[in-house]
Image: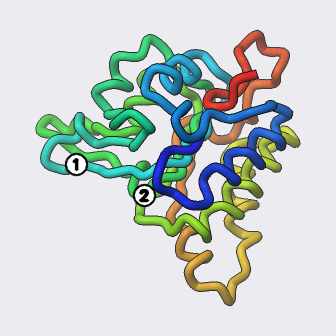
């Protein structure tokens, strides 16, 4: 899915959807809180190309920007189940905030607590234009059945080393969870990819 305010996000979402054989991603006015959360529940794969903000002062209100407002960590914690694999192409979305008692709170921890096996997200601010080719390379590898961590490493190593902005964008992405396994196959009885309804 592609959130508002990112010039390349809709084209990126369309290419990613095509890579996985899905006709149309949730973009523009269709990328609403209700439709996105419904699509995430139990999907094999969710790609969220959005603006993101991390609130160190109150991490439950860290947010991903959708067409009709923010999708917060608090909202994600209310889901009964996340997608098997979640890719978040948003600034800082991979960062977690440590709370008193050593509790981690953020997008990654919220998804992992909802049965998501793999989360790929950036721990730093990322530029839209330089992120798109990395995400497309990642998803091509995922579609071929590569394990999630290996697919991310391949996408990162494929960046032109003379392009400093692309290198910085690629280096910011991490894979957390059970990254050594591939995305669940389409035959696993899960719905199609989230944000990309069939």
- Residue 193: name its quadrant: top right
Residue 151 pos. (x, y %): 74, 51
Residue 86 pos. (x, y %): 57, 36
Q: CA gap, disc 1 to disc 2?
A: 12 Å
Crowd rating for badge 1 (residues with CA inside 10 Å; few <14, some 14–19, many 20+)? some
Q: Residue at 63% x, 41% y: name it.
A: 179
Q: Nearer the viewer, residue 169 or 70?
A: 70
- Residue 7: name its quadrant: bottom right
Give the quadrant of the C terminus.
top right
Horizontal relation, residue 137 to residue 92: left or right: right
Residue 159 pos. (x, y %): 71, 74
Identify the secondary structure beneath mark 2: loop
**As displayed, is residue 2 above or below residue 74?**
below
Q: Residue at 34% x, 36% y: name it.
A: 69
Crowd rating for badge 2 (residues with CA inside 10 Å; few <14, some 14–19, many 20+)? many
Residue identifier under label 2: 91
Identify the secondary structure beneath mark 1: loop
Residue identifier under label 1: 55
The outermost residue toward the bottom is 162
**As displayed, is residue 11 above or below residue 75?**
below
Give the quadrant of the N terminus.
top right
Horizontal relation, residue 159 to residue 58: left or right: right
Sequence-wise first label, 1 or 2:
1
**As displayed, is residue 138 above or below residue 83?**
below
């Amino acid at each position: 899915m592609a959130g508002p305010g990112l010039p390349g996000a809709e084209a990126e979402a369309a290419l990613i959807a095509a890579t996985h054989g899905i006709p149309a991603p949730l973009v523009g006015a269709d990328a609403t809180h209700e439709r996105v959360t419904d699509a995430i529940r139990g999907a094999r794969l969710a790609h969220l190309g959005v603006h993101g903000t991390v609130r160190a002062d109150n991490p439950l209100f860290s947010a991903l920007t959708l067409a009709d407002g923010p999708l917060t960590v608090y909202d994600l914690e209310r889901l009964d189940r996340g997608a098997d694999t979640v890719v978040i192409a948003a600034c800082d979305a991979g960062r977690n905030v440590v709370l008193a008692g050593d509790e981690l709170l953020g997008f990654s921890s919220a998804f992992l607590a909802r049965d998501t096996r793999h989360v790929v997200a950036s721990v730093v601010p990322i530029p839209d234009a330089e992120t798109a080719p990395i995400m497309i390379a990642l998803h091509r590898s995922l579609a071929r059945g590569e394990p999630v961590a290996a697919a991310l490493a391949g996408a990162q190593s494929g960046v032109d080393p003379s392009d400093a902005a692309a290198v910085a964008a690629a280096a910011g992405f991490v894979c957390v969870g059970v990254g050594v396994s591939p995305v669940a196959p389409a035959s696993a009885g899960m719905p199609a990819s989230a944000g990309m309804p069939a």
